[in-house]
Image (tube, rainbow, N blue to C red):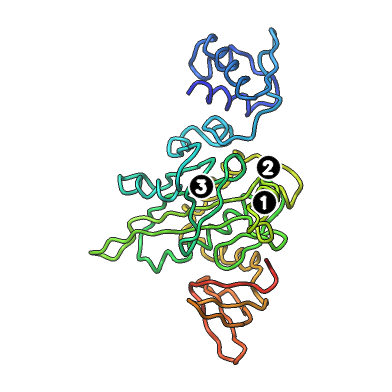
Amino acid sequence: MTKNSVLAVLLRSDDYVSGEKISEDLGISRTAVNIAVKSLRKDGCTILSSTRKGYLLTSAPDRLTPGDLSAFLTTDRMKSVQCLDCVSSTNKLLHDMAYEGAPDGQVIVANEQTGGRGRMGRTFYSPADQGIYLSMLLRPEGLPADATALTAWAAVAICNAIESVCGIRPGIKWVNDLVMNGRKICGILTEMSVESETGRIQYVMIGAGINVNEELRDFPEELQSVAASIRTVTGKCCSRAQLAAEIICEMDRLRFAWPAGHADYLEAYRRDSVVTGREITVLSGTSAQNAVADRINDDFSLSVHFEDGHQDRLTAGEVSIRGIY
């Protein structure tokens, strides 16, 4: 859309941009530029205009639109990024697209989810205009066991993005939650499709829900003691478009580093872990056992020792850190 393209140009500039330059860069008429500017103003953008200088964007609503994302991603990258206002689940939509042949690196970004999902079939609170709900498709070569570390890699990638844009780095609660000040700000859900005849991976979907600009009162009462957002921790609003774009860039780095970059992601994961050395409760079905988390192993599994003295290596399941929530 012309409006999104004009918005991207204005977002990239810290100074006035002439209508003539916008027209030439986008290959559209000056009239089309004027119409787009008027439409952006109706959307809530503050755009100054000067006969000699052109247009200057001084403020814009915090939105996740193609135009907003285009300010931070290249035109080529945007070709495989679908930005939607509301979906039931980004992972579900991406699953359908993967089945139809979507390419490695295809991304779905949504402003809201009505059926957001977490691990174990849980729902993920996904309100409009506050968080980022993003899924990326990967088509790695290999067997399912080779891809079990992708969730951990994704946790590191999203930590990198949040630190880069917001200036604060979350911790990682094994295996797929990001936390700040003892509260959850992000959940990651990795799903895989395997070819039955060969046992090889068809595709992997990595989905993430990030609490960005919620205030504490915005969370349902049952979540207010365990959930947080980047805003509640830092006291500042964060540009969701910029953060979403940086997450995409970090996930691209993950794709290109897989699997040769294992050592770097493992080192970062161990550094960011908030589990190691902590008293935990290991949940399995209806049972719960107290233990201490000893270390993150080379395959991102968690070594623990229990109160009765026996040790184990956890590759999946639920871990609750005493006192963190």
Q: Nearer the viewer, residue 16 or 190?
A: 190
In the rendered view, does 156 fall on the left or right side of 150?
right
Which residue, as the protein is rendered here, is positioned at the far front? 221
For badge 1, the amino acid type reads: Ser
Q: Which mark is residue 134?
A: 3
- What's the distance in space between the residues labelled 2 and 1, CA to CA? 10 Å
Residue shown at 34%/47% (left/top)? Answer: 96
Residue shown at 40%/56% (left/top)? Answer: 204
For badge 2, the amino acid type reads: Cys
Q: Is residue 225 above or below residue 275?
A: above
**Helix, strand or loop at disc 2?**
loop
Label 1 belongs to which residue? 229
- What's the distance in space between the residues labelled 3 and 2, CA to CA? 16 Å
How far across and down, in percent of the image, does residue 66 sit? 51, 32
Sequence-first disc among 2 and 1: 1
- What's the distance in space between the residues labelled 3 and 1, CA to CA? 16 Å
Residue shown at 59%/50% (left/top)? Answer: 210
Residue 107 quadrant: top left
**Helix, strand or loop at disc 3?**
strand
Q: Nearer the viewer, residue 67 or 285?
A: 285
**Helix, strand or loop at disc 1?**
loop
Crowding near the residue tagged with mark 2, few <14, some 14–19, many ≥20 C-alpha atoms within 10 Å: some
Q: Is residue 186 above or below residue 215?
A: below
Residue shown at 65%/55% (left/top)? Answer: 221
Sequence-first disc among 3 and 2: 3
Label 2 belongs to which residue? 238
Labels 3 & 1 near each other (Cβ < 8 A): no
How far across and down, in percent of the image, does residue 236 sit? 74, 44
Crowding near the residue tagged with mark 3, few <14, some 14–19, many ≥20 C-alpha atoms within 10 Å: many
Of badges 3 and 1, nearer the viewer stands 1
